[in-house]
Image: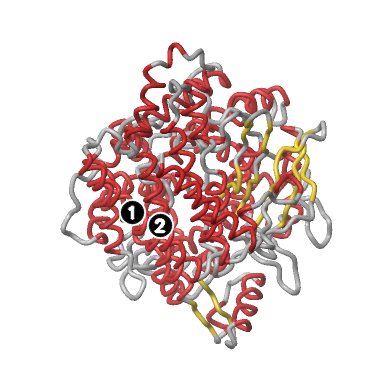
Amino acid sequence: MKKSVLVFCAACALLSSCKMESNPFLRESPLPYGAPEFDKIKMEHYKPAFEAGIAEGKAAIDKIVANTETPTFRNVIVAMEDANPILDNVGNIFYNLLEADANDEMQALAEEIAPMMTEYSMYVSLNEKLFEKVKAVYDNRENENLAPNELRLLDQTYKSFVRGGALLQREDREKYAALSEKGSLLGLQFGKNLLAATNAYTLNVTDSTRLAGMPEYVLTAAAEAAAERGEQGWTFSLQAPSYGPFMDYCRDRDLRKELYLAYNTRAVGGEFDNSQNVKDIAANRIETSNLLGYETYADYALENRMAKNKATVEDFLSNLMERSLPFAKAEVKEVEDFAHSKGFEGPLQSWDFAFWSERLKEEKYSFNAEELKPYFELESCINAVFGLATRLYDLHFEPIDLPGYHKDVKVYDVKDGNGRHMAVFYADFFPRESKRGGAWMTEFRGQSIRNGVEKRPFISIVTNFTKPTADEPSLITHDEFVTFLHEFGHSLHGILAEGEYSSQTGTSVARDFVELPSQINENWGFQKEYLRGFAKHYKTGETIPDELIDKIISSQNYHSGYYQVRQLTFGTIDMAWHTLTSVPEETAQAFEKRVLAPYNVLPAIPQTSMCQSFSHIFNGGYAAGYYSYKWAEVLEADAFGMFLENGIFDKATADKFRENILSKGDTEDPAELYRKFRGRDPESEALMVKLGLTEKKN
């Protein structure tokens, strides 16, 4: 009891102190919808807010434990759900900005906060008396008269305690806490090294003849990058808008090789080496899993996913690999033969494939990605993506004068057709050194209903599209537009969330289910009726010709075997690391080469290694889960078939998808939700048919 009082007083003291400093994390936001006061947040606000949030959370947990009433769903499970308002607020903002707009001070603070957060996590998950209360509610669940979503929340809460070490003996609980803290710090260091390694390299070219074949927009951006750095000529980086087009179009093979090796040896050796981090993270996960009674980390991670176990995942990956590998090999041979026909000598290497593949695509389909870009001005693409949400789900996006966390961030008020506020939407499109590569969706606040009051979500989308230049607006490739649709699909999952408890709403679903809304959304990027509605030349206003759309559609499965195998190798190396029972003595690089050797369709490059930059599995929540992209592709290929059957803008189908998938979150079993939408289980052959990988290859 005294401990509870002391913790509560500490929280009050911190709240009082920080209010005097006007800490925006420790007060109700005065902005519309309670949106984050990004313009008021300073670096010095984070740590006091974390400290206050932890104190508040501990006080709430202590109150639950000290309650002498009979444990119930309300006074235990719901009370736990509501225990961390401050910590949820500051954590959602801090950790998202750590990915989207970080600096050295923030990265250092993340390392300082990590042990604090781990200690608090252990304070909850290894709290014997708290677990006794949870178990009492769980054992009495049949007498609680709970709704299905409440039963699911209770079941998952109980299992999370068990999976978090609640049944361990005291000595092992302490060991588990230490392993958790170490794992958190290792992940942070991995991400820090990768960002630093990515930013550390640039390629400056002063001889224009070496840049033959490069599109004008790439050269313009590279010239501006050089000027910003005080350099002559053109400067290229490892950021996607720079690296991707360079590999596709630069005719100078030596320069392609140099940039390829720089990209594929990021954080491999040198000052920002992640090689030992990879092995240490794997070892930490093995030890943690063993402590909890699992043979491997994959056994632990897959328990609560649709796949359920590693055998299912391994069979899924190997079956797809076996069927796809012959197609991939045939596609690589086709590119190599084509290159030889154009005078290329020697075997095709990894730094040659994208270049010659793009040339072959131009010849086969009589167009290239650059021919499309004038029709995909970013602003018109934004309107088109929003317009799709309007047509399918009656959502409307209106610019709103709210602060973003960076000057590039656009902010929108999302409402439905009846004027109901659905979400605040933040869009952050352009690359910068403070942002990691790639594209993702996240949230600053999830949807919930507490005590009859609904809080609608704050959703964010982050990409790395080409920035506008002095001469032209931001023009994106069709591939980037499809990426936009993908991440926006995740956003819809958050925007349309409807539920009581934030831990069950939006994208808080099984890892191998979460990609269904994103990947099904990509399909509209290949539908003529949709593309014709917005794709207009940014200079002339001309609607994209049907001929070009036909080429987009006909080339949709261009080298689908190669790209499927590429994705499957990512899933394969992920499972290889996470089905280990001990870390091999060989280097991370050697382990990767050995595991992936049977699936190489291009010559292996000894010095390269992807694991040291594979943030998805070593610092991004996809450990033993990268297979989920392909798993969800099976779901979406089957699910989109219903739109094709009924019409791509069919409102009844969209309503059914919204009702059973987008709005439900994790309130029901995902397999059951899918059956409610489709009327049956998914048919796995749908993916191979969609990709055109059904004709047998030798």
**In this view, 223 is above or below 64:** below
Residue in the foreground of this view, choosing between 677 and 455 = 455
Q: What SS does tag 1 mark?
A: helix
Query: What residue does disc 1 label?
Result: 181
| Amino acid type, callout 1 | Glu
Image coords of residue 60 (percent x, y): 49, 39
Residue at disc 2, secondary structure: helix
Residue where numbered disc 2 is placed: 114
Find out whether the residues at labels 1 and 2 contact each other: C-beta distance under 8 Å: yes
Work out whether residue 566 can be spotted.
Answer: yes
Q: Give residue 512's position: percent from left, percent from top.
A: 44, 36
Relative to the observer, which residue lies in front, 140 or 595? 140
Image position of 168 with respect to 55: above or below: above
The residue depicted at 52 percent of the width and 53 percent of the height is 52
Three-letter code, disc 2? Ala
Which quarter of the rendered picture does the N terminus lie within?
top left
- Residue at the left extreme of this rendering: 585
Badge 1: residue crowd in 10 Å (few <14, some 14–19, many ≥20): some
Determine whether 79 is above or below 376 in the image: above
The crowding category of the residue bearing disc 2, from other C-alpha atoms within 10 Å (few below 14, some 14 to 19, many at least 20), is some
Numbered badge on residue 241:
none
Q: Nearer the viewer, residue 83 or 320?
A: 83
Q: Could you tell me residue 669's position as x and y percent?
A: 47, 24
Residue 521 percent location from the top left of the image: 61, 39
Query: Counting residues from the N terminus, which is met first, the one under dot 1 or under dot 2?
Result: 2
Residue drawn at 54 percent across, 56 percent down: 14
Work out how far the residue at label 1 is from the one at label 2, CA to CA, in angstroms: 7 Å
The residue lying toward the viewer, choosing from 662 and 384, is 662
Judge from the rendering whether residue 255 lies leftward or rightward of residue 329; answer left or right: right
Quadrant of the image containing the C terminus: top left
Q: Residue at x 65, y 46 (%)?
A: 458
